[in-house]
Image (tube, helix red, strand yellow):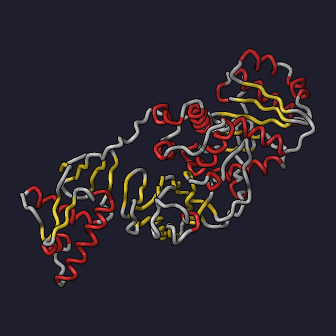
């Protein structure tokens, strides 16, 4: 048997729109009191979120007037809480300052955002069959447009659930064909081998249109050999051939390859995808904060197909049972137990971790209070706290008291309000909490 043709990949990355523009950071609205705002993108560079600073938050009573600031520099994107009343959360943890990664879920007031990085302009728009404005998906749409203008045999390659069938159908539709779209599943060995015995007839069935051979990576060696004959017949006829395969499969007989990203590689498309699937399923997109946080942070090995299945499951479930349908447990209505790590670098509000490693002064103040509590000190003076937290610095007494006051206020806002007590001479830990050496 002859060896199947070897792929010569054509690099079409330069066809992406505005490819010379730099990538910048964005916040993509995922959860909003106004469903119309879902999917909206906010340029993140030096963006201040709050009721007095951004129109999106004007009516959000859960947001402070100046809630949080986004700062973009050479090292990436950072978020800084500005002493907000209800705190700023990243991946479920309340933070004072945090370096952000693409795909992080950020909660400010009543809003939830996904961190994205993409070009400033997106010339290509998705539709109801191919949904997404992420940088990764924009490249796919650009390659689809370029392919539609050609007659090249192309391979659409991606993991199951990434949309191989939808991309192939889009390429056909954008080609404005006069003929039909014909599908052939290479996994059905008897069917496909029978069809490939007469390649001329098969090509004629898709004349002036497109023949899609699906899952060629699952085809037998006999089928691959017959496929080479089919591609030669298609070149002589008036039929365009598209192939689909798994993400890591070797290409067969194609001169152009479209590699589809996984959903985890295009997480900033989650808002638009969830909204699209919700509309199709009749689901109210005003999901609870717990459900939104779960959808934003979980992994999707089944890709877009898995997400569609989850949204359909939610649509068939009463809203009060959504968390149960996803295997989640809602936070208890009572106040969660507070656990403080002995070194002061983090504490837990129930299951939620508040990380202070990016705020070493706050961690040092908390560590001083923990140490005093362990030694049985009823109240630790502000001057003593300042000596421990700003070790080696000379600070005049009034300035020291002010620094400690600001630090303690920040800790209280981050969730320790009910366990840090103030007195005329200093501060102490009291109430329902435990000190632990680990999570």
Q: Can residue 99 be seen in this view?
A: yes
**Percent position of residue 269, x then y:** 61, 49
How many numbered callouts?
0
Residue at the image position 68 percent from the left and 55 percent from the top: 13
Q: Is residue 80 left or right of residue 136?
A: left
The answer to whether residue 88 is above or below residue 281 is below
**Percent position of residue 63, x then y:** 47, 62
Q: Is residue 83 left or right of residue 157?
A: left
The answer to whether residue 187 is above or below residue 407 is above
**Percent position of residue 270, x then y:** 58, 47
The answer to which quarter of the image holds residue 419 is: bottom left
Image quadrant holding the N terminus, namely top right
Q: Is residue 65 left or right of residue 428?
A: right
Q: Can residue 237 be seen in this view?
A: no
Residue at the image position 49 percent from the left and 33 percent from the top: 321
Residue at the image position 18 percent from the left and 50 percent from the top: 435
The answer to which quarter of the image holds residue 392 is: bottom left
Residue toward you, 52 or 44: 52
The answer to whether residue 376 is above or below residue 276 is below
Residue at the image position 6 percent from the left and 57 percent from the top: 376
User: Residue most toward the bottom?
Assistant: 396
**Percent position of residue 44, x then y:** 54, 66
Residue toward you, 17 or 63: 63
């Amino acid at each position: 048997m002859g060896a199947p043709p070897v792929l010569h990949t054509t690099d079409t990355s330069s066809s992406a729109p505005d490819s010379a523009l730099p990538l910048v950071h964005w916040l993509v609205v995922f959860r909003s009191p106004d469903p119309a705002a879902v999917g909206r993108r906010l340029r993140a560079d030096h963006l201040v979120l709050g009721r007095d600073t951004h129109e999106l938050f004007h009516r959000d009573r859960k947001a402070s007037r100046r809630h949080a600031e986004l700062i973009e520099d050479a090292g990436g994107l950072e978020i800084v809480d500005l002493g907000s009343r209800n705190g700023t959360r990243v991946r479920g943890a309340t933070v004072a300052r945090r370096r952000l990664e693409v795909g992080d879920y950020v909660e400010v007031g009543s809003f939830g955002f996904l961190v994205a990085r993409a070009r400033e302009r997106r010339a290509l728009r998705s539709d109801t069959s191919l949904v997404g404005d992420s940088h990764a998906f924009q490249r796919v749409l650009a390659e689809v447009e370029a392919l539609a203008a050609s007659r090249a045999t192309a391979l659409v390659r991606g993991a199951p659930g990434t949309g191989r069938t939808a991309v192939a159908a889009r390429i056909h539709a954008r080609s404005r064909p006069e003929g039909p779209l014909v599908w052939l599943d290479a996994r059905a060995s008897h069917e496909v081998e029978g069809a490939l015995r007469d390649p001329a007839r098969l090509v004629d069935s898709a004349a002036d249109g497109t023949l899609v051979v699906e899952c060629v990576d699952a085809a037998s060696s006999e089928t691959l050999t017959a496929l080479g004959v089919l591609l030669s017949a298609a070149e002589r006829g008036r039929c365009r051939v598209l192939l689909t395969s798994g993400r890591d499969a070797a290409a067969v007989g194609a001169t152009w390859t479209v590699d589809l990203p996984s959903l985890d590689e295009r997480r900033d498309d989650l808002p638009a995808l969830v909204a699209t699937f919700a509309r199709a399923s009749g689901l109210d997109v005003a999901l609870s904060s717990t459900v939104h946080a779960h959808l934003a942070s979980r992994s999707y090995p089944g890709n877009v197909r898995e997400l569609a299945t989850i949204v359909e499951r939610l649509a068939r479930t009463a809203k009060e049972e959504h968390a149960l349908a996803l295997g989640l447990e809602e936070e208890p209505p009572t106040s969660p137990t507070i656990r403080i790590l002995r070194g002061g670098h983090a504490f837990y509000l129930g299951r939620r971790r508040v990380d202070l490693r990016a705020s070493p002064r706050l961690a040092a103040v908390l560590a001083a209070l923990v140490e005093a509590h362990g030694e049985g000190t009823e109240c630790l003076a502000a001057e003593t706290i300042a000596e421990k937290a700003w070790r080696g610095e000379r600070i005049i007494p009034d300035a020291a008291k002010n620094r400690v006051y600001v630090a303690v206020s920040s800790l209280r806002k981050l969730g320790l309000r009910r366990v840090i007590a103030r007195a005329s001479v200093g501060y102490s830990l009291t109430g329902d909490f435990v000190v632990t050496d680990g999570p």
